[in-house]
């Protein structure tokens, strides 16, 4: 299975980055790839064997899906690993470097969409996260 990695650097403290990544009230504000989409619902039980379910849908109601999975390993402010509902594995690392945090997200590619399309979508979401955190309006 092919592995895809997306990364970004966020100019913020690790506490803010971690909270924005893991708390449902923040996930609702960034977990979508474009301004024509939204995340109207987010449930997150951040612990090993805990479940998550984030609803992603087009603002015009034309399509949507639930992004779900089970956490495997959590090291607070450093690492999150989980298995998506379809069995694919995701690893997210948070690395502090002076006044910024490098986030690296590695995931198993799925066979339906082109690898580049998957990379572009996941990169757009992580960049949306960066924009949300750096704006700091919450």
Image (cartoon, helix red, strand yellow):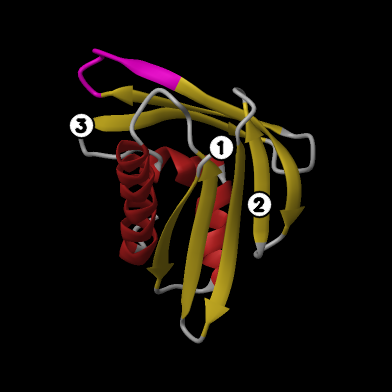
At 45% from the left and 73% from the top, the residue drawn is 12
Residue 38 locus on image (x, y percent): 32, 31
At 36% from the left and 45% from the top, the residue drawn is 119
Residue 18 locus on image (x, y percent): 57, 59
Locate residue 95 relative to residue 130 in the image: left or right: right
**On residue 1, which mark appears?**
1
Tell me the chief SS of the magenta region: loop
Q: Give the magenta range.
A: 59-65
Give me the C-alpha separation between circle 2 and circle 3.
28 Å
Magenta stretch: includes residue 51: no
Verify CB contact (< 8 Å) between mark 2 and mark 3. Answer: no
**On residue 53, which mark appears?**
none
Q: How many marks?
A: 3
Q: Can you identify the residue that label 3 sits on?
A: 36
Locate residue 68 relative to residue 78 in the image: left or right: left
Above or below, 60 against 33 in this view is above
Q: Can you identify the residue that label 2 sits on?
A: 80
At 59% from the left and 23% from the top, the residue drawn is 86
Give me the C-alpha separation between circle 1 and circle 2.
20 Å
Quick one: which residue is furthest to the top in this view? 62
Q: Quadrant of residue 1?
A: top right
At mark 2, the secondary structure is strand
Residue 16 locus on image (x, y percent): 52, 64
Quick one: which residue is furthest to the bottom in this view? 98
At mark 3, the secondary structure is loop
Locate residue 10 relative to residue 80 in the image: left or right: left
Q: Between 73 and 2, which is closer to the camera in this rendering?
A: 2
């Amino acid at each position: 299975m092919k592995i895809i990695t997306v990364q970004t650097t966020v100019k913020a403290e690790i506490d803010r980055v971690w909270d924005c990544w893991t708390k449902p009230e923040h996930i609702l504000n960034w977990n979508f790839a474009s301004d024509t989409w939204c995340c109207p619902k987010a449930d997150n039980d951040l612990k090993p064997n805990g479940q998550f379910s984030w609803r992603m849908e087009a603002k015009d109601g034309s399509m949507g899906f639930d992004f779900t999975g089970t956490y495997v390993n959590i090291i607070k402010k450093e690492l999150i690993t989980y298995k998506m509902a379809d069995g694919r594995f995701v690893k997210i690392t948070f690395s502090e470097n002076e006044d910024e945090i490098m986030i690296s997200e590695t995931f198993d590619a799925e066979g339906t969409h082109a690898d580049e399309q998957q990379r572009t979508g996941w990169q757009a979401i992580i960049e949306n996260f960066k924009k949300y955190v750096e704006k700091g309006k919450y």
